[in-house]
Image (cartoon, grey):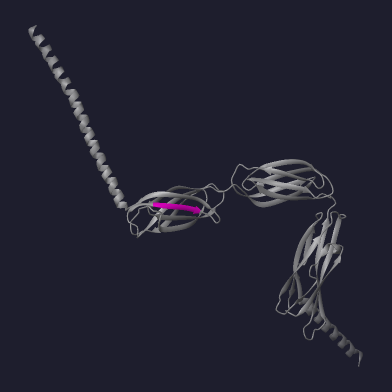
Amino acid sequence: MSEKIKKILFVIVINIVFIVLATQVLSLGIGPVYTHIEFQPNLIQEYKFSVYNNDNQNSTIKLSVSGELAEYITIPEKEFTLGPEEESKEVNFIISLPRELTPGDYASRIIVNQEIQNQGMIGAQASVSHKIDLKVPAHGKYIRSEVKQKNGSMQIEIENIGVKTIENLNTEIYLSGENNSVFESNLGSLTSGDIKTTEYIPNMKGEFHSSAIITYDGLRKNISQIIQFGEPTISILDFKPVDYKPGEINEFRVNVSSDWNKELNLTIKMDIVDENGLSLVKAQTKKAIIDKKEVVIYADTKDLKPNTYGIKLLVEGKKQIYTEEMHLVELKSIETTQEVKKINNKIDWRTAIISSMILLTIALLVLLPLKVKINRRREKISQKKGKL
């Protein structure tokens, strides 16, 4: 065999090996490929990534750890199989750090080996890895912090979990909608292992986005979360039927108010009952309420005769009833109501006429005797002048 043919065959074999290896690598994938860990003394934290069976092959997966953090990494399940029907498998690993580590950068890898068992590929292998890195800062000062709600207040609990004393510890609380910090506190120093708590009692109600900023010896930590102060108060301001007509679908209007700072999705229920409390007609509607809003409820009252009924009104949210009221309402046609008003108007005019006549009579009774006296006096004066 000539040298030229040997070279050609060598190139072909190399290409075949490269294609096979590339195929095997592409058949295995992981995600995410990277985990970054912030150092905390005595940290115990579970992390995860997924192994993907890209070619849906029958294979065995074996996991191992290498690098500077190997002694702090635990993998509960180091070997498992992936069947052709399995697209992926989740891998969990646990990081358990000591209280102290020398400041610096640390790195490790979880190596994922795949042994493919398909026909024609027995023993073929592919390998990928998941990178883990850890940075241990030089300051050596660490805190554990937690924001709690208790009895309508906001509490921040801070523990020094490092080995060094924190000399200057401060907290600031900001709430959404506020231009300035609503609460500031200087907690002084905090020795290793000690806990301090600061409390903020607000003078407002509602749901707010809070930001608690903790500063300690030039370091800073921010805790953001949604926090709630108090409970909503929902009131029914007014209730009335509108242009009521017996035997038809009628409109009822309810004015509802809320003292909450966010929209509340409420259900307003109406139940028309007779004198014995028996339910006759039920209706309801759902509305998003903030501040004040007029809500319209439509009820089919075709079976109700004109009469006075009790109407139960109930306003509820997802988990609670906010308010419940009972109203006595006379349900009759708008024409009848107008007729009553007209009759009342006629009675008012008659009363006015009678009152005027009485006043005129009194005036005549007073003025007539006075006029008689004046006339008599004039007669006497005239007689005296005649004698002279």
Residue that extends furthest to the top in the rendered view of this protein: 388
Q: Where is residue 367 in the image (x, y as percent from the top left)?
A: 18, 23
Q: In which quarter of the image is the N terminus?
A: bottom right
Residue that extends furthest to the front in the rendered view of this protein: 276
At a point 75% along the width and 67% down the height, the residue shown is 49
Image-based side of 290 in relation to 155, left or right: left
Residue that extends furthest to the left in the rendered view of this protein: 387
Image-based side of 209 in relation to 370, left or right: right
The quarter holding residue 373 reads: top left
At a point 73% along the width and 76% down the height, the residue shown is 54
Q: Nearer the viewer, residue 204 or 161?
A: 161
Q: Where is residue 188 in the image (x, y as percent from the top left)?
A: 78, 40
Seen in the picture, residue 91 relative to 99 is either above or below; the reply is below
Q: In which quarter of the image is the C terminus?
A: top left
Seen in the picture, residue 110 relative to 143 is either above or below; the reply is below
Q: Where is residue 234 in the image (x, y as percent from the top left)?
A: 51, 48
Q: Where is residue 295 in the image (x, y as percent from the top left)?
A: 45, 53
- Start and end of the magenta stretch? 310-315
Seen in the picture, residue 86 relative to 35 is either above or below; the reply is below
Say whether residue 313 is magenta: yes
Say whether residue 331 is magenta: no
Q: Of helix, strand and loop, which mostly describes the magenta segment? A: strand
Q: Which of 47 and 34 is in front in this view?
A: 47
